[in-house]
């Protein structure tokens, strides 16, 4: 088997109906859905499969995405068991990655991301927080504009380094809107507020760090069958102590996704994304020349397994 990295998406990949084909075709996925519902005391089938406004609320979005990613991974592992060179993620997809390498039980991870979402919403409830995507502006120019705005008392920070020319900013919505003009003067192709009520990966979430770290201490294990690439450093780690430190920092630090691909690309020959939508597969088209496969539903699972099986013959 060629050297492979496993990828796990974070918030923004959610959609009504995700995971349904896994549940319809696999008793394992159906059991996972039931177990997650029992653990969280939430009807996960209703959350995932029926039109609702809960799926866009962070405390529900995060466990929903993680559950579908874990369905995709476990069904793939059943047919194609293998250990990745490393697991690489976007944002809190790091908890999906930790589960896939044995550092946390998947059901504990579902509970943990639900708590993470609640803590994030609580941290932002007193302010009108949000996030804004910026296309077509160099990182250093966005950083400079945010720095100047903070010097003037605004609360805006670079939050997600997704790809060259694609960066997401977090902060107070009115402050984000106040720098739109500067970003357009810097030749931004597009500046758009996202449909979010939290400001991820910035200092507005400082109050969530300690309680989340305490909860992670209970759930995480010092059992890594493969390293995980940290969003904070773009470097690999493989211990509980490192995970506790880095996942706490992740709440208030930017996601270094494109840097993580760039700095670790030479170590693998391909990537496989587990989760709805193929979001990271799309980002990887701009970040690497290597193939990214996506297991996002039951049909794509079968296609990926068949492709890898043919390759091994």
Image: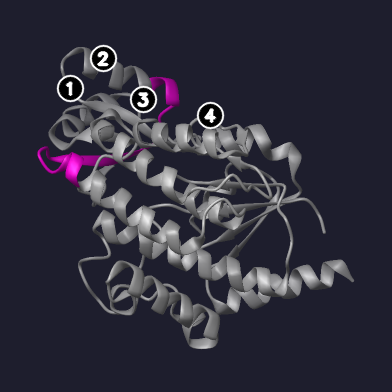
Question: Can you tell which of label 1 and label 2 is closer to the viewer?
Answer: 1
Q: Is residue 137 magenta?
A: yes
Q: Quadrant of the C terminus?
A: bottom right
Task: Report which residue position mark 4 lands on.
Answer: 233
Q: Callout 2: helix, strand or loop?
A: helix
- Disc 3 residue crowd, few under 14, some 14–19, many 20+, Cα 10 Å: many
Query: Contact (CB < 8 A) between labels 2 and 4?
Result: no
Marks 3 and 1, the one that precedes in the sequence: 3
Question: Can you tell which of label 4 and label 1 is closer to the viewer?
Answer: 4
Residue visible at 36% across and 34% down in the picture:
159
Marks 1 and 2, the one that precedes in the sequence: 2
Question: Can you tell which of label 3 and label 1 is closer to the viewer?
Answer: 1
Marks 4 and 3, the one that precedes in the sequence: 3
Relative horizontal placement of residue 187, taking residue 289 as reference (left or right): left
Task: Report which residue position mark 1 lands on.
Answer: 154
Distance of label 4 from label 1 (alpha carbons):
26 Å
Magenta stretch: give its range.
122-142
Q: Is residue 242 above or below residue 55?
A: above
Q: Callout 3: helix, strand or loop?
A: helix
Name the residue furthest right: 313
Name the residue furthest top: 151
């Amino acid at each position: 088997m060629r050297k492979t990295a496993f990828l796990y998406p974070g918030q923004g990949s959610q959609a009504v109906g995700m995971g349904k084909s896994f549940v319809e075709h696999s008793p394992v996925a159906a059991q996972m859905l039931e177990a997650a519902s029992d653990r969280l005391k939430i009807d996960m089938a209703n959350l995932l499969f029926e039109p609702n406004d809960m799926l866009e609320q962070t405390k529900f979005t995060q466990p929903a995405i993680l559950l579908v990613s874990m369905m995709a991974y476990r069904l793939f592992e059943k047919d194609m068991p293998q250990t990745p060179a490393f697991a690489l993620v976007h944002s809190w997809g790091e908890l999906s990655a930790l589960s896939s390498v044995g550092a946390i039980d998947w059901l504990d991870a579902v509970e943990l991301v639900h708590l993470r979402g609640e803590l994030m919403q609580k941290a932002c409830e007193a302010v009108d927080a949000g996030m804004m995507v910026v296309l077509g502006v160099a990182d250093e120019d966005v950083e400079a504009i945010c720095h100047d705005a903070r010097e003037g008392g605004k609360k805006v920070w670079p939050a997600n380094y997704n790809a060259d020319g694609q960066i997401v900013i977090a902060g107070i919505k009115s402050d984000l809107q106040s720098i739109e003009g500067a970003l357009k003067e810097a030749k931004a192709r597009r500046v758009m507020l996202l449909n979010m009520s939290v400001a991820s990966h910035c200092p507005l979430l400082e109050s969530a760090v300690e309680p989340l770290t305490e909860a992670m201490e209970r759930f995480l294990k010092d059992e890594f069958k493969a390293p995980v690439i940290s969003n904070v450093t773009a470097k690999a780690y493989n211990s509980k102590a490192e995970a506790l430190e880095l996942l706490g920092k992740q709440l208030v630090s930017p996601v270094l996704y494109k840097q993580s691909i760039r700095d670790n690309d030479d170590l693998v020959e391909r990537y496989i994304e587990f989760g709805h939508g193929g979001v990271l597969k799309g980002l990887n088209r701009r970040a690497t020349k290597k193939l990214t496969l996506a297991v996002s539903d039951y049909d794509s699972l079968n296609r990926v397994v068949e492709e890898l099986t043919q390759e091994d013959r």
